[in-house]
Image (cartoon, helix red, strand yellow):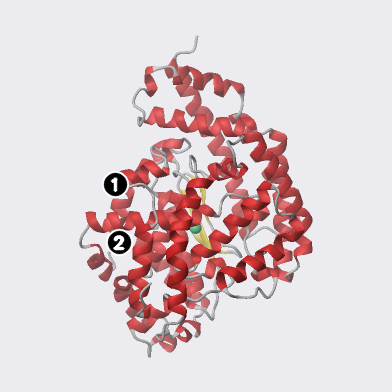
Amino acid sequence: MTTPQQAYNELLQISREVALLKSLGSLLNWDQETNMPRGATSYRSQQRSYVAGKAHRLFIDPRVDELLNIVEASELVSDPFSDAAVNVREWRHDYDRAAKVPSRLVEEISRTSVLAHEAWVNARRDANFALFRPHLAKLIDLVREMAEAIGYESNPYDALLDGYEPGETTANVEKLFSQLREAVVPLVQAIQHASRRPKVEILQRHFPIERQKLFGQAAAIAFGYDFQRGRIDAVTHPFATDVGLGDVRITTRYNERFFNESFFGILHETGHGLYEQNLPAEHYGTPRGEAVGMGVHESQSRLWENFVGRNLAYWEHWFPRAQQMYPESLSDATLEEFHFAINEVRPSFIRVEADEVTYNLHIMLRFELEQAIIRGDLAVDDIPAAWNERFEQYFGLKTPDDSQGCLQDVHWSFGGFGYFPTYTLGNLYAAQIFDAACQALPDLEARFRVGDFAPLLAWLKENIYDQGRRYRSRELIRRITGRDPDASALIAYLREKFGSLYDVDG
Ligand code: ZN
């Protein structure tokens, strides 16, 4: 007879072993993106699918269900927010999802993804959708099969979204997005007709890559990113990844002729990295020691990148340092000119380069297309045309080629349907969280002016990072801000900041 405590201990052991296997997968992925020679692609696909399949099988063993049943019926979970109850609740969520998906399907998605990724890189480089098309078609079939296996009430997209943002539904997201859309569309129009324009040419001067590396590293350190437990490497499509306990890596891409690309990319990934580096180490490998979901994750990258890194107070400290680093490019610019330039609002093709105002329109477009793809209403051959048509509606621009259209993002190449909405959820949460931080720490911006980010990091650590998956995202936002997630904080922030920069009423 297994006691509840024994069952719980056995679950902890399994969970840590699964985390160990997943961390090997992360390391293989990081290596693939940074250093791997091309000749290794096919065998790497076997390596990754092997560890993914192994982790999956270990976790979906019927023994896990038995053990969960024992603990679920015990005193161990009577306080719903105790460590044990949180672990059990989230294991149950993850188990029920994972157990419904056959290992064959998991391995097939993993194997297909590696080949699809390679094809996507080539397709994007050559602006040739046909190269990616067969892989994408296969992945869509597999992902739709996965949604069916997981199950859903009325919308198959819910099954996918729940994988990135546990407990969230398509209908909820749609409500938040339409609230935001109603405010953003007129704000973009007002800005397009504004007479004030930033001098963005300042940012397109010469910024030697060796100095960008030093400057970006200094900015990451100032936020509190720990290089004893991390590193920065250059890749095509930047990301942050938890490679194991004490090892959270970030990546970026450098552009000698554009200041923003690596600098704000690094601040963004540093935000993700800070979250991972500050999760409670004693709970590593269990839900209590993991990030809530991708929405809250993205709220941290956005908060550090935009609410801090594009704030005037931040640059009061950092602009003189930027001028010292790049005297030939920045010595004739003023702080105000520079700050306006890094906050330029301009409808453009590439999501990852989009400003804070138009960014969410990029996500809404993807959210709508993905739903149609998953419902089976949009065939793979029709994706480029559907993308371009909707893009023109939203942005008033004709997409010149698929590299700047439906081939620009990495997500579909790994079957990551359902992921995109978490970016805008992240922006919404970030605005609410930053408001709450400003109320709790009234001298926050004064601290930014002297380059001190420790009080903000400590507040985020206490309220978010230390909590792991104790609360689901809605509950977490409610506890921090006293309200449910909604768009009003982001709308107020965008109207105030960009209304005053461009001298318009949103
Ligand atoms: Zn991000």
Counting from the top left corner in percent of width and height, residue 458 is at 29, 52
Instruction: Kindly state the secondary structure of the residue where label 1 is placed.
Output: loop
Quadrant of res 272:
bottom left
Q: Amino acid at mark 1?
A: Gly
Q: Residue at x 41, y 51 (%)?
A: 275
Which residue is at the front of the view, 483 or 336?
A: 483
Check the image and report above or below for 281 versus 449.
Answer: above
Q: Earlier in the sequence, mark 2 or mark 1?
A: 2
In the rendered image, which quarter contains the C terminus? bottom left
User: Given contact means CB atoms under 8 Å apart, are the residues at marks 2 and 1 in contact?
Assistant: no
Residue beneath label 2, please? 453
- Looking at the rendered image, the disc whose residue lies closer to the viewer, 2 or 1, is 1
* Closer to us: 147 or 107: 147
* Label 2 SS: loop
Alpha-carbon span between mark 2 and mark 1: 24 Å
426 in relation to 23, above or below: below
The response on whether ligand 1 sits within 8 Å of label 2 is: no
Q: Which residue corresponds to mark 1?
A: 482
Residue lying furthest top:
1
Q: How many marks?
A: 2
**Residue 265 — which label?**
none
Of residues 472 and 253, the one drawn nearer to the viewer in this rendering: 472
Residue 46 placement (x, y as % from top left): 73, 44
In this view, the residue in front, 117 or 409, is 409
Q: Please determine whether, in this image, residue 472 is positioned above or below residue 218.
A: above
Say which amino acid is labelled 2: Phe
Question: In the orientation shown, which residue stands out farthest toward the bottom?
Answer: 332
Residue found 73% across the figure and 65% down from its top: 123
* Residue 230 in view in this figure: no
Which quadrant of the view contains residue 233?
A: bottom right
Q: Is residue 368 visible?
A: yes
